[in-house]
Amino acid sequence: MHISFYVSFTTRRNQLFQPKKVSKNTFPRFLPLHLTSQNPPNSCFLMPLFSNKLLFVPINTLRSVFFSNRSYIRPTKNYNPNFKILVSSMTTTQRPNEEGIAKRLWVRFNKESILSLYTPFVVSLASGNLKLDTFRQYIAQDVHFLKCFAKAYELAEECADDDDAKVSITELRQSVLEELNMHGSFCQVSMWSTSWTNKRGSVNSNISDRVVRGRKQEWGFDVSKETFPNSATLKYTDFLLATASGKIEGVKGLASLATPFEKTKVAVYTIGAMVPCMRLYAFLGNELQSLVDNNGNHHPYKKWIDNYSSDAFQAAALQIEDLLDKLSVSLTGEELDILQKLYHQAMKLELEFFLAQPIDQQIVVPLSKEQNPRQNRLMIFSDFDLTCTVVDSCAILAEIALVTTPKLDQIQPENQNQVAQMPSADYRNIWEALSRQYAEEHEKIMECMLGDQKVEKFNYKGLRKALEQLSDFEKRANMRVIESNVLKGLNLEDITRAGERLIFQDGCMDFFRCIMKDERLNVDVHVLSYCWCGDLIRSAFSSGGIHDLHLHSNEFIYEGLISTGEITRNMESPIDKLQAFIDILKEHDQWDGKNLTVYIGDSVGDLLCLLEADIGILIGSSTSLRRVGTHFGVSFVPLFPGLVVKQREHVEGKFFSWKRVFGIVYTVSSWAEIHAFIVGS
């Protein structure tokens, strides 16, 4: 049982709502709904369960709305109750401490950056065992970008009307020339010191030739010989040059633009199409640099990584982002939409560029494509509450009960065929007492579990024994809930409606849809949950078009469509989850092939299953799970560095297997990483 109610997002700039302290007996009266592209940035909207009015709420306010019921949300003067949706477009002026458009777009399209990081090319390059022939072909394609970026900068400068913007573009170009002058002779300069700057900064065509000669000297091959851009390269360069020439859907061509102000917009769009490349390479450089540091100076592609993680390149990425922020302040909402589409298209083309690099070697990503469906079955196990969702299901069920419980003066004489429901005032008092008791006892159990001295080596037996204490506690807490009758009288239709509106973690639903609908894969999906009501989970997944997953959870008992308050208690504890996991595997042992198991979870209740699976993936940053795991010697390894190690093992002929390494749990920050690892692009 979990007693919690929270949403974890970032801050919204406009305070549309303000928290107000009220009586401790007041409950939050809103249910989170699905985020949409129409939402104001960094916000979500809420809806009272049985109202048709949508409210936009700043996320900092949501952070204060915990299940302790200490505050609620009220509209401020900016809210018009006559509107179902309060629409907010991007403003044309940036407020203090407000993120610029470049940062917001990078965050919005973060999935493409994660997918790029997890491509076979980047993972192999990071491991150091990428074949040189593959890298040579990558460099050859990169040469075609040099002239493209140079020309795009030139066209952007011609279109820019603002003197400061012209100066910024000139500085970006000048930084390339200054760096070259510092080295004296280009042939003594590593190609890495110049390739990125010319690619994105110089309009001097002679630099391209010197880059080529430098590459020949560094790597023993000559890319000055005639090469042809592949389809992914052509697609990107054509897009960029078309944008810089004003050939943009919904925008007049350069010949039709009468004023310098109109032409400036083309400069904005061009810079917007170039920023993703700069920011993506800066991101990749930083991610790979820590791996190089751990590997000393022996990494064969260290200079490539050093360049993209260098202070100079990071500064250049920030400079072009700052330029985009300044140029875009005069754009209208419609023009910002165009800019966003161009940015997103550039991100997708960068991803396609990495995917187009031919890989002729063993790879570990994506996991699903490395499994022969005739010989291997991929078994995906996942927790539900706060692993798949942003809100714990018990908070949703409590909200339904609160909204539907009658006030004292509304109670009708009990019908013989009707399940009686307690008055709302009694419900609030009982639920608050249950919540308080749960929190206090849970803290004591955690202290007891961590009372012994921290172990130096992984101690599975000690961990399991400790979690047995937590199991007993969870079962007692559930029994108190049943005996209190707080879940009595809930209507199945209300539960179904709440499930349909439940917010999933970003990318979670897409992952399950993708992996379950790919007929080329041999995949079995199981959801293991403490949730009191399986109908809520089924409704939530069904609303996203997912109907065939296997659900293992507790279930409400009904009389007709009304809950009796009793629960069929199938899964209440870490031990129950582990037993369900083991039983499912036993059922599949009859198959002649091999099973590869992946478990995805977020809390202490998932820890044993995370350790028993071949690949255990912890999503989020549960403090209690890490405390318990670390205390008993569990190692938490970020997934990407872990994959790089596996890639080295796979290619270097060492023993390689995804079969579990006891005591290791991989960590991710989002479902985008899980998707990139298991499914790929």
Image (cartoon, rainbow, N blue to C red):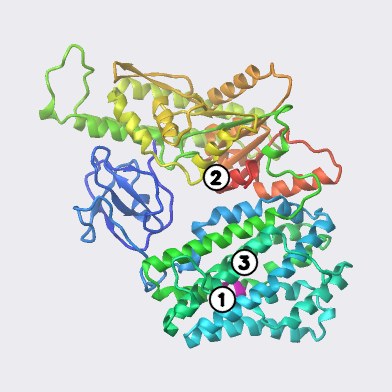
Closer to the N terminus: mark 2 or mark 3? Answer: 3
Read off the residue under disc 3: 238
Q: Nearer the viewer, mark 1 or mark 3?
A: 3
At label 1, which amino acid type do we have? Gln
Rate crowding at label 1 as few (under 14), some (14 to 19) or many (20 or more) other CA atoms within 10 Å: some
Q: Nearer the viewer, mark 2 or mark 3?
A: 3
Vertical placement of residue 423 versus 322, above or below: above
Rate crowding at label 3 as few (under 14), some (14 to 19) or many (20 or more) other CA atoms within 10 Å: few
- Residue at 68% x, 53% y: name it: 355
Q: Secondary structure at mark 1?
A: helix
Q: Is residue 432 visible?
A: no
**Number of the label disc, if any, that sits on residue 671:** 2
Q: Is residue 316 left or right of residue 10?
A: right
At label 3, which amino acid type do we have? Asp
Q: Pinpoint residue 464: horizontal percent, then vertical percent.
A: 60, 28
Read off the residue under disc 1: 319
Is there CB contact under 8 Å for labels 1 and 3?
no
Q: Secondary structure at mark 2?
A: helix
